[in-house]
Image (tube, rainbow, N blue to C red):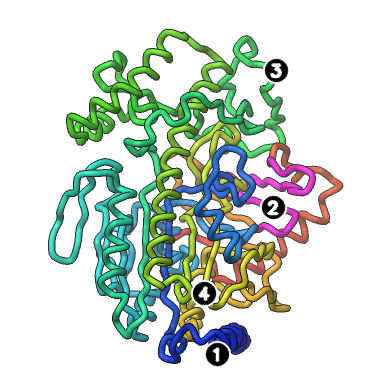
Amino acid sequence: MLEKNRLYIVAAALVFLVSVSITGCQSEDKISNKPNIVFVFTDDHASHAISAYGSDIIETPNMDRLANEGILFRNAFVTNSICAPSRAVLLTGKHSHVNGQLTNGQEFDGDQLTFPKILQEAGYQTALIGKWHLQSNPTGYDHWDILPGQGHYYNPEFITQERTHQIEGYVTDIITDKVINWIDDKQNSDQPFMVSYHHKAPHRNWKPHPDDLGMFDDVKIPEPETLFANWSGELTDEQASEDVIDVELKNRTSAVETQEMTLMNHFYKGWDLKFPPDSIEIETRHLDLWKSRYNRFTEEQKAEWDQVFGKYYQEYNESELEGAERLSWIYQRYIKDYLSTIKSVDDNLGRLLDYLDEEGLADNTIIIYASDQGFFLGDHGWYDKRWMYEESLRFPLMMRWPDGIEAGIENNDLVQNIDLAPTVVDFSGLDAPKEMQGMSLVPLTQNLTPDDWRSSIYYHYYEFPGAHEVQRHYGVRTDRYKLIHYYQIDEWELFDLQKDPNEIQSVYNDSEYSEIVNELKAELQLLRDQFQVPEEDSL
């Protein structure tokens, strides 16, 4: 496989060499350089909040530009939909049970092999700027400048090898400034560079850029089809509207009834709706946390915030909404703040693309855009991630390399975030180590799918008990079916994604699917054996 990947890269390079020999635009020394790599990594960015993926709730022109000028992966899935474990998978190319980062609560083992270490050893200048969220200090980077913990949207602190410092402003702008400045300092070197450009956005609690406060006030964002899925009886018969979905809970895991991530019951006036703290009369969960974040604002920022969010609080109080109407109102506030933070990410991606163009770096720079996982955008009446359901399982993945990837490719193969580390190593002209469990995506970027490409993916979520109370589960997904095992309560779900893309009804107990169940259980065991998943969790 690796030898075949080498051939794909060589073929792409030969095409480029021929074009250069005709135009005479670049020197032979420039041609022979390894590509630069910019890895743009967002936090909780759902692929259905990118217009290149067909979103009807936001326009993302700069992300769309990446997709149009390179390759967009339609079926990219994570292995464990939660922040720190996904970041460990990204670095190592290994499943959570192998790299040791099963939950958010553990410290990442930075002594193990990662793709930045491999590139650093091969002569790349390496940097990590932005969100890290792995507790231990970064390794494999010549330079790092990271947010402590989750970081802050406004006036964030940064930690470097030398010091901790605070910068006034908005975090997405500041991270982009730092990335551009670092590249600007390194671009004239004979060494190629790799920079991990990691955003905080659009992570909870979704504070918009000052310029984007109220940007969606005159717009009603379309509601997801499953917003009113009444999992836990949040809506009484009197409160429900005709849009409420009658879910037959006997066909679903009991885990959907015990989760704590509904917009109706688990979305708070302070932390999530972000009303001015002094106006909130009743103590709510996370209110003290919100007060501490609110007090980080400068007086000018606070005044701008109160002008906009004070208006939302007044509207909320005066309307006295209940039931489905209240849920619709909360959804609009949630999704508008979430999308506002994405708008800032897209704006700053445009800044970076323009910079690379202006400096003549674009053609030989690979840009990879990905997120640590997907996110529920009111789907199923939820926010957050964790589940093996599609909105959480999928993540956006786009790549652009004018010198090596044809523009306008869309790929439908099953790919995972364990593939990203071996892909970056492969792009740099090196062989990925055997301990990496993923597969290089380089042949797919050349529109060539290897005969032995995977036909199924493995997923495993561990963090229970914990935030949002989602039961531990593992499962297998093929191009059509998904089988999930909630192993601590021994419950199963099966979805026919062709007939039920919204995953409303499990058909696990349907006799028509008994053969499919048996086939998927066998496939699931093969994957667990292949990846050497222990029978008992190491927690």
Residue located at (35% from left, 78% from top): 117
Q: Which residue is mark 1?
A: 21
Q: Nearer the viewer, mark 3 or mark 4?
A: 4
Please state which of residues 474 and 318 is positioned toward the viewer in this rendering.
318
Please state which of residues 168 and 320 is positioned toward the viewer in this rendering.
168
Q: Position of residue 163 (x, y in %)?
A: 13, 60
Q: Which residues are magenta?
A: 476-502
Q: Nearer the viewer, mark 3 or mark 2?
A: 3
Residues at circles 3 and 4 in contact by the CB criterion of under 8 Å: no
Q: Which residue is mark 2?
A: 482
Q: Separation of disc 4 and disc 2 at Cα?
A: 26 Å
Q: Residues within 10 Å of mark 2 (few under 14, many from 20)?
A: many
The label number, if any, that marks residue 242 in the structure image: 3
Badge 4 element = helix
Residue located at (54% from left, 37% from top): 377
Badge 1 element = helix
Badge 2 element = strand
Q: Amino acid at mark 1?
A: Ser
Q: Which residue is mark 4?
A: 423
Q: Nearer the viewer, mark 1 or mark 2?
A: 1
Q: Amino acid at mark 3?
A: Glu
Q: Nearer the viewer, mark 4 or mark 2?
A: 4
483 falls in the magenta region: yes
Q: Position of residue 168 (x, y in %)?
A: 20, 44
Q: Separation of disc 4 and disc 1 at Cα?
A: 28 Å
